Amino acid sequence: MNAVSAELDRRFREAASDEHLLDVAYDFVDSPIGSLFVATTERGLCRIVYDADSDRELEKLARDFGVRVLRSAKPVDPARRELDEYFDGKRHHFDLPLDIGPLAAFYRNVLGELARVPYGEVVTYGQLAARVERPRAARAVGTVMNRNPVPIVLPCHRVIGSTGKLVGYGGGLERKEALLRLEGALL
Amino acid sequence: MSQMSLPPFERFYEEHREEIHSFLIRRLGPQRAEDAFQETFLKALRAYPNLRHGEQLRAWAYTIAGRVAIDEHRRPRADADLPELASLDGRPAFAELEHLADELPPTERAAVVLRYGYDLDYAEIGAALGSNATAARQAASAGIRRLRRKETQ
């Protein structure tokens, strides 16, 4: 009887974002490849994490964006909507603004090129390296993919090895395969 | 010896929402406690980035809730002449002690402020300090003794 009701809890979390008091709002988004931890600032989407360890993610968000990190569904709704459409096969590119923080030039360039790899197509690590004019930096490109703060939206699943093998994925190879299958890039 | 760092607000909220809600219900009844609950945590959220460390967060939360409860209490009869809470039973008026309380050790200060500033009972202060009513009473009384000594110095 005395417990905080779900409704009271929801109202507070919504008021906190309506009053622009949050550094980061986050929530969990259901998807066919598991529950996604999705976080956003007022500037844009800042994290998508598979199999998230919440404590660890909250600490990292607090360090990178500020301590006012709160679970709040409403600010995450635009991302939830676009991800739902993507997994329904109805959306081939994302319109969400991103806030992935200050990055070294190489990271920024690689992620910028990555964003241009179209739905349903794949490139190799080496090709992506060549596109940022660092043709020998395939391995470094792999590192950038591995640290992609917003997988799916920045499509690191579309980057594969030179032999056509999928090679690796932060969320596990079966997820990379599922995403490429969804996009029709794998038969 | 590093101070406890400030946790992400979500953790602070999860840890204290139930007891702050119960406290507000005891003070205001279930209806008014709802508004006061939201007000308390919105105030906490506004002030949160200015905290320098994660010590005494529970006492801090009670302090905010206590202030919100007092404001809520006054609201419906704002023009009535309410007596100062602390003078009801001859305890020292908090206003006389407030500036001195800053110099007390943290636990004693929290106990004095919550008891005389916000009129929490010792069981509530004990909960806020992570101890119990007896320890809270001792801390408040040690704090008051220390303040009296300062006052007469």
Image (cartoon, coloured by chain):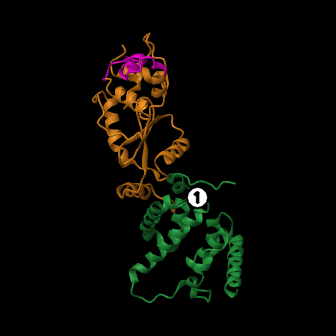
Chain colours: A orange, B green
At which x and y percent is residue A13?
42, 55
Q: Which residue is mark 1?
A: B53
Quadrant placement of the N terminus of chain B: bottom right
Q: Is residue A56 above or below residue B139?
A: above
Q: Is residue A172 above or below residue B6?
A: above
How many neighbours does mark 1 have within 10 angstroms: few (below 14), some (14-19), or many (20 or more)? some
At which x and y percent is residue B89?
61, 88
Quadrant placement of the C terminus of chain B: bottom right
**Does A122 appear in magenta?**
yes
At which x and y percent is residue B58?
58, 63
The residue most toward the top is A163
Taking the spot 30% from the left edge, 27% from the top edge, the residue there is A89
Taking the spot 47% from the left edge, 35% from the top edge, the residue there is A49
Q: Which residues are magenta?
A: A118-139
| Label 1: which secondary element | loop
Query: Quick one: B87 or B23, which is closer to the camera?
Result: B87
Taking the spot 52% from the left edge, 86% from the top edge, the residue there is B84
Q: Is residue A77 left or right of residue B17?
A: left
Taking the spot 45% from the left edge, 78% from the top edge, the residue there is B73
Q: Check disc 1 and give the amino acid type.
A: His
Question: Which of the chains bears the disc numbered 1?
Answer: B
